[in-house]
Image (cartoon, rainbow, N blue to C red):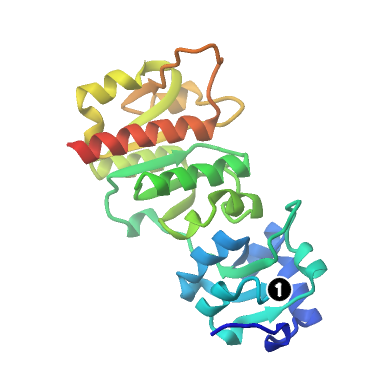
Amino acid sequence: MHFDEPRALPLISRGQQRAARRLLSRKGREEDGLFLAEGTQAVREALRRPELVEAVIVSNPAEHSELLAMADPQICWLAHPSDIDQLTDTVTPQGIVAICRSELASLNDLPAPKLAVVCAQVRDPGNAGTVIRCADAFGADLVILTKGSVEVFNPKTVRASVGSIFHLPIVVGVELVDAVAWLHKNGVQVVAADGGGDSLDQLAASGELAAPTAWIMGNEAWGLPQADRDLADRVVGVPMWGQAESLNLSTAAAVCLYATASAQRHA
């Protein structure tokens, strides 16, 4: 189905617009069990999970006809561009937003992962979303955001994941000690990423990364406290040969996940 004329879609009502705006707040998201996915790529990935999509709001149907063809026409609404702007904080909104059902996993319902990443009190939504995107890119089975981390359905987190939030199980709100215990129980080695640890190169060369592995990534400001480091089987850092002082969280996660996924694929 293609929408060549804007009036092919019902105009969003004031009540529907208010309900959508509620999802800009954490309280609204938690009470309604819904969140917003903004932008072409995020909406596309959401529509590949149609059971999660409550509505699609668009300002220019002709521009997004491909995406609208993927959606149930009964859940598509037309909105004025200014109404779309109210649902996003991006500088240049892409004119399409999906209202999606929140879906989170429980550790006890999941099989043992081969590759996982644990965000320990990661507070920056952009970093959290990018780590989810990296985990998805390198074939991870699981992302865990421990208690004290940013809300996973924060609009900035969702946007930074660029649709990856719909691709893999995400567990939130668990204590780090409980997450590590569950991983160990399921035969997964736990590695803490920290600049002062052993070299990632050495670990990759030894073949140890071919085993099921979970990486703990620490907080942006204070890293991993010693008590958290002690929970891991070993502490590993990314070697750097240039003059940069350090890598940011999401970049370090990308390097560690790539090295592990590569070792596992070659094993």
Q: Which residue is mark 1?
A: 60
Q: Secondary structure at mark 1?
A: loop
Q: Is 196 located above or below residue 180 in the figure? A: above
Q: Looking at the rendering, in which quadrant would you find the C terminus?
A: top left
Query: In percent of the image, x 41 and y 21: which residue is there?
Result: 238
Farthest residue to the left: give it: 267
Q: Residues within 10 Å of mark 1 (few under 14, many from 20)?
A: some
Query: In percent of the image, x 72 and y 79: which residue is there?
Result: 78
Q: Is 46 located above or below residue 157 in the figure? A: below
Q: Is 164 located above or below residue 36 in the figure? A: above
Left or right? Give the position of 188 relative to 160.
Answer: left
Q: Which quadrant of the figure has residue 53? A: bottom right
Task: Give whichever of 6, 245 is nearer the camera.
Answer: 6
Query: In percent of the image, x 47 and y 21: which residue is there?
Result: 226
> Where in the figure is residue 257, as x and y percent of width and height?
38, 36
The amino acid beneath tag 1 is Asn
> Where in the figure is residue 136, as x and y percent of width and height?
41, 49
Q: Is 165 located above or below residue 147 in the figure? A: below
Using the rendered image of the protein, determine whether residue 147 is visible from the camera's viewpoint: no
> Where in the figure is residue 121, as x and y percent of width and height?
55, 37
Task: Give whichever of 6, 174 is nearer the camera.
Answer: 6
Using the rendered image of the protein, determine whether residue 112 is visible from the camera's viewpoint: yes
Left or right? Give the position of 147 relative to 14.
Answer: left
Task: Give whichever of 30, 170 is nearer the camera.
Answer: 170
| Number of marks | 1
Q: Which quadrant of the figure has residue 259? A: top left
Query: In percent of the image, x 62 and y 44: which residue is there?
Result: 125
